[in-house]
Image (spheres, rainbow, N blue to C red):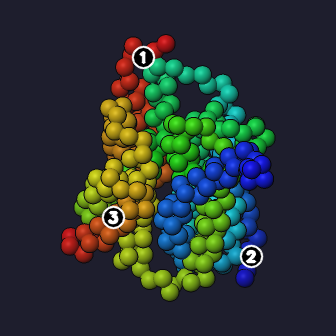
Amino acid sequence: MAMDQVNPLVSTYRREARAGLHDIAPVAVAAVPIGLLFGAVAAAKGMSPLEVGLMSALVYAGGAQFAAIETWVHPAPIVALAFATLLINVRHVLMGASLTPKMKLSRAQTFLAYFFLTDEAWALSERRALERPVTGAYWAAMGLVLWGNWTLSSALGAILGSFLGDPERIGADFAFTALFIGLIAGFGRSRVTLVTVAVSAAVAALVHHFIGAPWHVASGALAGIAAAYFAAPEEARS
Amino acid sequence: MSLDMTTLLAILAMAVVTYLTRIAGLLVADRLVLAGRAKAAFDAIPPAVLVAVIAPTALTTGWAEAIAAAITAFAAFRLPLLGTVAIGVVSVVVLRNLI
């Protein structure tokens, strides 16, 4: 019957949004203890729950926020914080460049959508892009859930503060690492991928040990990318 | 609920820098047409960046974290994402108590 037929555009939109929710759900759950942890640490450094919530809502970049809080002094050193943020987040440039051709969005829509660009949303989208283009509905569902989740959990962490106890005792500090290992596994076990992972891990660990954060991210990533270039078969060139 | 002016400016500076890094990739992507080895290098960006972020925690913090990372990697090819995270967190807690 005609009345039972759903507009194909609406049904596609719903299916894409549902896929986004399905994919981001485990990430959002894993991010809750990390958000609580961030809020609690920030509160211990003297930030109010309002300031913590604002930072999470506007910056929305866990790595940069943890680095900022780690070195937080009062009054806040604006230029130093901005520079550290740039170093940690410069990876977004590569991520955005890699993802953009796979996004089914207009240029103006992408400028808005990329406010929600995170390691997690990007990694899931790259994985989805192996099979189909990334739609606005898929991206929006993931982005809004993860953003709301991060903002609320970090503000709540600031309010709860010291009640949470030692995060290391409950292993919450390792959730981020375990989550990333799960995401990396999604890229498969091809020879080129294994070489990339091994070289990136070794260089990042060495640079972190001998030079220090945040230089390990850019150097490890670039070494892994170079390794992939040389590990790939030359005859594939076209 | 207090809102310090210097803190607010620092948050805004971090927010602007972060947003610029997020849209910068959009501006250079149009000029990238890749094939062969260059494409392999470009496709390697996702795992390379993800690994670099966690490598210090996973490899150089201590034996508990290194072994837990190996267990997590083993689980990652067999379990859904949330199960992988659970295995990782549980194994790091157990190993920290043992080592």
Element under disc 3: helix
On the image, the x and y values in percent for residue A26 come to 49, 61
Q: Is residue B51 left or right of residue A18?
A: left
Instruction: Please give the name of the residue rendered at 39% of the width and 52% of the height, measured from the top-left corner.
Output: A181
The label nearer to you, 3 versus 2, is 3
For label 2, the crowd category at 10 Å Cα-Cα, with few meaning under 14, some 14 to 19 and many 20 or more, is some
Question: Which amino acid, by three-letter code, is at mark 1?
Answer: Ala
Cα gap from disc 2 to disc 1, whole angstroms:
57 Å
Mark sitting earlier along the chain (3/2): 2
Q: Is residue A26 above or below residue A9?
A: below
Residue drawn at (63%, 51%) of the image? A15
Which residue is disc 1 drawn over?
A236
**What secondary structure is found at the residue carrying circle 2?**
loop
Q: Are marks 2 and 1 on the same chain?
A: no
Q: Residue furthest front?
A: A1
Look at label 2 and name its amino acid: Leu
* Label 1 element class: helix
The crowd level at tag 3 (other Cα within 10 Å; few <14, some 14-19, many 20+) is many
- Indicate the quadrant where residue A132 lies: top right
Q: Which of the two discs, 2 and 1, sits closer to the camera?
A: 1
